[in-house]
Amino acid sequence: MLEAMAGFDERDSTSSSRPVPAFHKAVGKSVKGLRVGIPTEYRAPGLPEDVLAMWEQGIAWLREAGCEVVDVSLPHTRYGLTSYYIIAPAECSSNLARYDGIRFGKRVDGASLDAVYEASRAAGFGPEVRSRILMGTYVLSAGYYDAYYLKAQKVRTLIRRDFEQAFENVDVLLTPTAPSAAFAQGENQNDPVQMYLNDIFTVPASLAGIPGLSVPVGLNGSGLPLGLQVLGRHFDEETVLSVGGALEAAAGFAHRPTLHAGAGA
């Protein structure tokens, strides 16, 4: 699927013209000799013991596969979550502005043009999307653009630089995917801050624009899956897939969580 999706698109100015490798051939390739970075800052205070133990197990698996494990520092990633939730809603607000019921999107009739806009925007998006549009519109508004959006973009540059410097010494990074297992159905749905905090390990990579892969490798004490995240250099998905394949083979993960199975049935 990645091979089909990747490549140049003449209608997409953000796409790359680089040749697309045969990504599937990277899975199962030896990882012996690769240097794996372990970000010091990702050992966050309060990280659950089962998540930490699974991370240590992943490190041990890669050592056994012939990798060299190296400690690295990503000092600005602690600002990743706050920066992301300024930049992402701003981009959401800008990119979805066209869905006004006139040119694109669902159209709901109204007594006036303004009424059509208001009804169409409200009916065309779910609660989370509407929330992000409102936040993004706020941070892009006059008086707040420099204070929030511009500052977040500067932090984004620092985060990207941290990753680039780390990849001068290592081939990939290994981190937990999330600071907890999956939430139960309906849990935390009214607590957006808690929901957003669960992205703490994944959003820095998104801000830096580097490839990442989450591999399910085990279960926590409640029977819910835990994952490890492999991050790589720009356009080096092949190494990411090789390391992910090594973790998958070592973990032999074939479990299905039973907690909450059948909930709502």
Image (spheres, grey):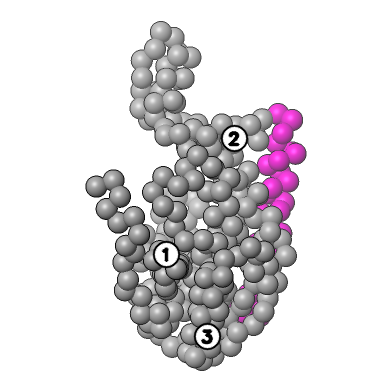
Q: Which residues are magenta?
A: 142-171
Location of the N terminus (image quadrant): bottom left
Q: Which numbered mark, 2 or 3, is in the foreground of this view?
A: 3
Q: Are marks 3 and 1 in contact (CB under 8 Å)?
A: no
- The extreme top residue here reads 111
Magenta span: predominant SS is: helix
**Which residue is at a point 45% across and 54% down the rendered structure image?**
183
Residue 209 visible in the snapshot: no
Mark 2 and mark 1: span between their CA atoms? 35 Å
Circle 2: is it few (<14), some (14-19), or many (20+) Cα within 10 Å?
some
Residue behind mark 2? 135
Q: Amino acid at mark 3?
A: Ala
The amino acid marked with disc number 2 is: Met
Residue 209 left/right relative to 157? left
Residue 238 % position (x, y): 45, 75
Is residue 147 part of the magenta span, yes or no? yes
* Disc 1: which residue: 222
Residue drawn at x 54%, y 55% as measured from the top left: 198
Q: Earlier in the sequence, mark 2 or mark 3?
A: 3
Q: Looking at the image, do the residues carrying marks 2 and 1 touch, with CB atoms under 8 Å apart?
A: no
Q: Is residue 64 among what the camera can see?
A: yes
Tag 3 secondary structure: helix
Q: Which mark is residue 255?
A: none
Res 99 quadrant in image = top left
Quadrant of res 115 = top left
Q: Residue at x 64, y 82 (%)?
A: 70
- The spot of residue 156 in percent (x, y) is 67, 54
